[in-house]
Image: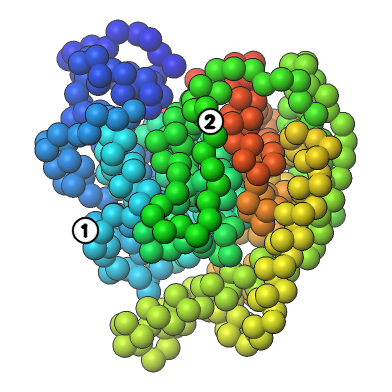
């Protein structure tokens, strides 16, 4: 992160600073929040026609917040984005990537959004996401595809692909994401970023929702620097009023743990897909290099099996997601007076809802029990190991169209979804924390992330390891060449 002096004739060094660095400049009077907002918007105007990372922009609300005066927080004046699913901000559209919700305007701020504002963040837009966040590519029919800044013929991943594309393109240093099966970690991997999924209910989903998809969906962020991610969790973690359960916040700040190397760790390494599906040699190579790096840093690494039933988890996730999406679609249809709301959503998701409608209640209960079984198995694993290391994705960033629903059957779409990302969902099922760390590049110049996960409540341990890895293999200056031209 840059420590160069800032020119008072403009702020050309915006992308040289992470969010903490930008906030320090504001605090020192070197720049004003309005300067940072202008710098962010100039990058949006330059690259958004190509990347299409944003779907709902509200620069007027951002300028109004700056003009009225921002709270004194850890990120005062730093531009920020919300993901276009699950995060309410008063007076803004929350369309969840769907034509069915295109005109859905929030009347209030959600709990996390209120905490973002209290931290001084300046929210300027919502990022593109697949319909209902149900894909590992961000290509909603309602709004069109987002493109990966590293190769615009490829997807930035999903479902938080708009957020990660925007960070990689320099719009903002970090952005809000959510993760129900890997939706923070996968696009972070594909865009060369650090992505962190906290322990379940460390960040709240209130004030109305308690948990999403049986507790598997966890909100947080992707970022360039580890310290930004940790400091943001310091600002947002903690229960909401009335939460029936929550993960307790650790005794030390997460930011303080980033700067301290962890003790020597026992790391289990699984390079093979738990489903027996292929793993791209480039993804395996980068994960193996990460394992060697961990050994060089003093940790003990050994090949292992995580011990959970990945095939059962794959079947359970499909049931749980379908049953959770169906009432939202039907409720919106009733509110709009539609006889057939399924006609307003993408065909593959309509198939998913129809399938869910036909399921007995016992199928849902059985699927939830699979989540608990997964948590028990991983819990036993973490009595023997401190950390589980694997590739984040089994494939490189996919070309646009490969993972999209299009005219695929639900079976074909779902199999491609899991083949792409067989490693990540166990941490959603269990509620345990996990992160994707940008530790390598493919031979063709595409980012490749490595996943590290730990036991419930061990978020601080992961941040400590991430900080150590970042110091050993810094990635902040490794950026896509946005002037290289546009792939067709």
Q: Would residue 259 appear left or right of 425 to someone viewing this image? A: left
Q: Nearer the viewer, residue 13 or 26?
A: 26
Mark drawn on residue 91: 1
The quarter of the picture where residue 316 lies is bottom right
Residue 150 point in image, percent of width and height: 52, 36
Mark 2 and mark 1 in contact (Cβ < 8 Å)? no
Q: Nearer the viewer, residue 17 or 441?
A: 17
Q: What is the crowding at mark 1: few (fewer than 14 residues within 10 Å), some, or many (at least 20)?
A: some
Q: Secondary structure at mark 2?
A: loop
Image quadrant for the N terminus? top left
Q: Would residue 89 appear left or right of 377 to someone viewing this image? A: left
Measured along the vertical axis of the image, is residue 371 above or below residue 7?
A: below
Measured along the vertical axis of the image, is residue 126 above or below residue 101?
A: above
Q: Secondary structure at mark 1?
A: loop
Q: Would residue 317 appear left or right of 204 to someone viewing this image? A: right
- Would you say residue 195 is visible in this rendering? no
Residue 14 point in image, percent of width and height: 32, 23
């Amino acid at each position: 992160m840059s420590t160069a002096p800032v020119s008072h004739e403009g702020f050309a060094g915006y992308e040289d600073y992470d969010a903490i660095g930008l906030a320090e400049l504001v605090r020192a009077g070197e720049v004003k929040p309005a300067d940072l907002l202008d710098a962010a918007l100039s990058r949006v105007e330059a690259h958004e026609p190509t990347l299409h990372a944003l779907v709902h922009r509200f620069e007027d609300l951002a300028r109004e917040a700056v003009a009225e005066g921002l709270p004194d927080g850890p990120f005062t004046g730093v531009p920020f984005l919300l993901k276009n699913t699950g995060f309410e901000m008063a007076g803004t559209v929350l369309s969840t990537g769907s034509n069915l919700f295109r005109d859905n305007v929030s009347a209030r701020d959600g709990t996390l959004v209120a905490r973002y504002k209290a931290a001084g963040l300046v929210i300027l837009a919502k990022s593109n996401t697949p319909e209902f966040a149900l894909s590992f590519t961000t290509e909603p029919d309602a709004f069109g595809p987002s493109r990966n800044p590293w190769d615009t013929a490829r997807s930035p991943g999903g479902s938080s692909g708009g957020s990660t594309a925007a960070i990689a393109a320099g719009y903002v240093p970090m952005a809000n994401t959510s993760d129900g099966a890997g939706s923070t970690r996968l696009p972070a991997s594909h865009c060369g970023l650090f992505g962190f999924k906290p322990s379940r209910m460390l960040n709240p989903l209130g004030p109305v929702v308690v948990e999403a998809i049986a507790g598997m969906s966890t909100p947080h962020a992707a970022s360039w620097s580890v310290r930004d991610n940790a400091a943001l969790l310091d600002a947002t973690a903690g229960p909401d009023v009335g939460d029936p359960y929550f993960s307790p916040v650790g005794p030390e700040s997460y930011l303080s743990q980033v700067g301290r190397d962890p003790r020597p760790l026992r790391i289990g390494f699984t390079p093979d897909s738990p489903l027996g599906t292929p793993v791209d040699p480039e993804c395996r190579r980068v994960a193996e290099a990460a394992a060697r790096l961990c050994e060089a840093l003093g940790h003990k690494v050994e090949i292992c099996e995580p011990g959970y039933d990945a095939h059962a988890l794959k079947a359970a996730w499909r049931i749980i997601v379908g049953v959770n999406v169906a009432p939202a679609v039907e409720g919106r249809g009733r509110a709009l007076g539609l006889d057939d709301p399924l006609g307003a959503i993408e065909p593959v998701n309509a198939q998913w809802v129809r399938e869910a409608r036909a399921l007995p209640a016992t199928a849902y209960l059985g699927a939830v029990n699979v989540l608990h079984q997964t948590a028990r198995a991983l819990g036993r694993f973490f009595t023997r190991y401190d950390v589980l290391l694997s590739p984040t994705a089994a494939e490189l960033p996919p070309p646009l169209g490969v993972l999209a629903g299009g005219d695929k059957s639900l079976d074909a779409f779902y199999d491609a979804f899991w083949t792409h990302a067989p490693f990540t969902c166990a941490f959603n099922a269990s509620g345990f924390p996990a992160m994707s760390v940008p530790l390598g590049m493919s031979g063709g110049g595409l980012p490749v992330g490595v996943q590290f996960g730990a036991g419930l409540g061990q978020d601080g341990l992961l941040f400590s390891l991430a900080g150590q890895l970042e110091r050993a293999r810094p990635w902040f200056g490794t950026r896509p060449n946005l002037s290289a031209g546009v792939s067709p």
